[in-house]
Amino acid sequence: MHRALTAALLPLFFLGSRGASLQEEPARAEPDGIEPALLALFDYDVELDLDVREEAYDSFDGYDRVDISYASPMGGRVPAYLYVPQTEEPWAGMLVMHGMPGDRSNGQTFGPGYARGGALCLAISAPWARLGPGEQMEPITFTEEDRANQIQLVQDLRRGVDLLLTFSEVDPKRLGYVGGSYGGAMGGLLAGVEKRIVAYALVVGDGGLYAHMTSPGDRIPPEGLDVETWQRWKSWMEPIEPLRFVAHAAPSQLLFQNGRTDELVPEADALVYQAAGSEPKTCLWYADGHSITRERIRDQAKWFAERIGIDPTALVGP
């Protein structure tokens, strides 16, 4: 029976930890070359004005949160939160990406802790989560809009790197990315394109929307879709699957964190995603399911500390 995707990528909460294990890394998948025309989809005019607008500013214990938006290269505005350290500079910089459904507010899972640890964090809302008055969220439409949204998301995240680097306090050699679920998948796509980020943490992610829909046992096409609509959607989405791009993340480093009992990203799907990732990579397994636990945060923070110099004790203690 097909897993419902909008239920699959739930808002992320801290749950009880179950214990991690470092599994022998899966065999390396031989990557297919990425055509220049596909890579060009994620390019944008770097001379465009970011046009950053500040809406609100709040101060908390150990960090400040700024409600901002900036111009998307593909039109419209990108709603975001900046989590600003109150520690001494220089800072690391970090992108934070939410699950599906979700929006920038889910950045609260990671943003405050990493800001306290010395990273300026930017959490954005995906294109499908930028709603006007009275609009309802439709993360997946099975139309070409899904392809456009995924391309726009990557451009907007890359533009987010530009924004982080406008801060003189940010060390350009200490940039990271953390994403959960849908964010864990889209991080693999970004990793194949954006080389300024040196460390990507991909949490409970899989190989992308098409891969998620075509696991063993899933109904193909999904219930409610005719074959023609499905084939069109496949032709739009399969070429830009994170599964293809994560193979080209090097020299950036990858951290995969997955759960043994995850019913939304089964172990077999996670293994395929991990195997596709380029070296260097670390694959951590946990006894629980589709969740962000304190143990995962602890392991992740220590991993980032070695790569972008944040203070891991600010997240989970010594």
Image (tube, helix red, strand yellow):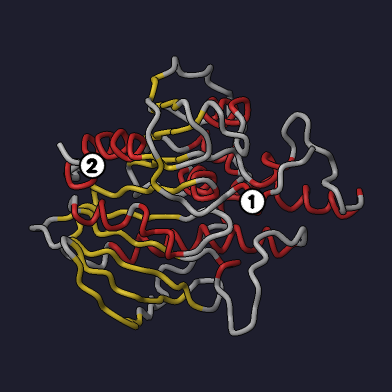
**Among all residues in the image, which is located at the extreme left?**
88
Q: In this rendering, does residue 251 appear at all? A: no
Residue 130 placed where, x, y %? 55, 73
* Picture quadrant where residue 294 is located: top left
Residue 39 placed where, x, y %? 56, 50
Residue 154 placed where, x, y %? 51, 57
Where 1 sits versus 159, above or below? above
Where 300 sits versus 216, above or below? below
**Mark drawn on residue 240:** none
Amino acid at pointer 1: Ala
Residue in the picture at 44% in, 33% down: 256
Q: Is residue 238 left or right of residue 38?
A: right
Q: Is residue 150 left or right of residue 17?
A: right
Image quarter where the N terminus lies is top right
Amino acid at pointer 2: Val
Q: Is residue 73 left or right of residue 35?
A: left
Residue 101 placed where, x, y %? 58, 58
Q: How many discs appear?
A: 2
Between 31 and 99, the one lying in front of the other is 99
Between 288 and 6, the one lying in front of the other is 288
Residue in the picture at 77% in, 61% down: 143
SS under mark 1: helix
**Among all residues in the image, which is located at the extreme front?**
16
Between 263 and 219, the one lying in front of the other is 263
Residue in the picture at 67% in, 41% down: 212
Image quarter where the C terminus lies is top left
**Mark drawn on residue 7:** 1
Residue in the picture at 43% in, 50% down: 13
* Picture quadrant where residue 165 is located: bottom left
- N-terminal of the two: label 2 or label 1? 1
The residue carrying mark 2 is 316
Q: CA distance from mark 2 to mark 1?
A: 28 Å
